Amino acid sequence: MRTGAGQARDAVLSALDQELAAGADAGAVANDLFGVVAMVDSEPTLNRMLAEPSIPAGPKQEMLQSLLAGKVADATMTVVKASVEPRWSRVRELPDTLEYAAISAYAAEAEGDGELDRLEDDLFRFERILDASPDLRDVLSDAAAPLEGKRALLHSLLEGKVGSATLGLLDQVASGRHRSLLGALSHYQHVVAERRDRLVAAVWVASPLTDQQKERLARALAAQYDRDVQLNVVVDPRVLGGVRVAIGDDMIDSTIETRLAQAQRRLVR
């Protein structure tokens, strides 16, 4: 049974899902919610007030109405007002949950366009690009650089090459809300995967897997974890053979180098 922050987040996501089911523009709601997150992050006093359990939800919702009226869509207002109804144990949980809802809204946009797979693939590929491009990572991580300039750079690199939901999310990666760009991308991928209750598995192999191999591996992992699994495959020539799989804190390692190391340890005992 989910309790505390989990139940509170579920309540906010439920409000989001109801608005989207009623026809709200998912992309517009996502963009609005990210804007609200930025506002709350930049005003610690406001954040503390909204998360303060001793203040009834009504006055907090009235304050949000006065702050956001005419600036966000009605659907966004409903979701944001829903965020001050639960009891939060930590101040940061409220903006974190609104960010979660924003990512989920972009995932819903992609899902509605039949591009949820593309969104997941785009985010993973860009994570790999950043991991291999320290100069680009440094530019996008530079806290002194104007955010709009960083976003303009991203658009010049990716416009027309990724979906609109991907570009919307990558616009937020450069905002500096997370400790690192790679950390932000990893978080975004997990939220998108959870949109359809799937786990994300990072898979390292020496050579590309065939579609049949991916399907067999995904089925095996789904059976083990009792959930669908999204495979993010990394081809790494340092892997001599076999496969290494990371899901959350779990590591499944059947690579040749690991087997050799295990055999060597047994021999020296």
Image: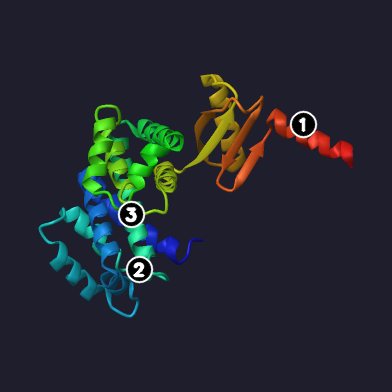
Question: Can you give x and y, in whole percent of width and height, for residue 79 in the image?
Answer: 26, 58
Local crowd at mark 2 within 10 Å, few (<14), some, or many (≥20)?
Answer: some
Camera-side mark, 3 or 1: 1
Q: Amino acid at mark 1?
A: Leu
Q: Splitting the image into 4 quarters, where does residue 170 fall?
A: top left
The residue labelled by disc 1 is: 260
x 29%, y 27%: residue: 161
Regarding mark 2 in the picture, which secondary structure is present there? Answer: loop
Please provide percent x and percent y for residue 203. Answer: 56, 33
> What residue do we see at 25% from left, 61% from top?
80
Q: Is residue 21 left or right of residue 69?
A: right
Q: Residue 86 got which mark?
A: 2
Task: Answer above or below: position of 165 versus 81.
Answer: above
Which one is in front, 259 or 11? Answer: 259
Residue 116, position as x, y percentages in the image = 36, 34
> Which numbered disc, 2 or 3, marks the residue that appears first in the sequence?
2
Q: Mark 1 or 2 closer to N-term?
A: 2
The answer to whether residue 142 is above or below residue 220 is: below
* Relative to 246, 58 lies left or right: left
> Please, what is the three-letter code of the amino acid marked with disc 2?
Pro
Query: Residue 163, position in %: x, y?
Result: 28, 32
Please tell me whether mark 2 or mark 3 is closer to you in this view. Answer: 3
Q: Which residue is at 38% across, 59% downward?
A: 9
Quarter the C terminus occupies: top right
Q: Where is mark 3, residue-wise? A: 99
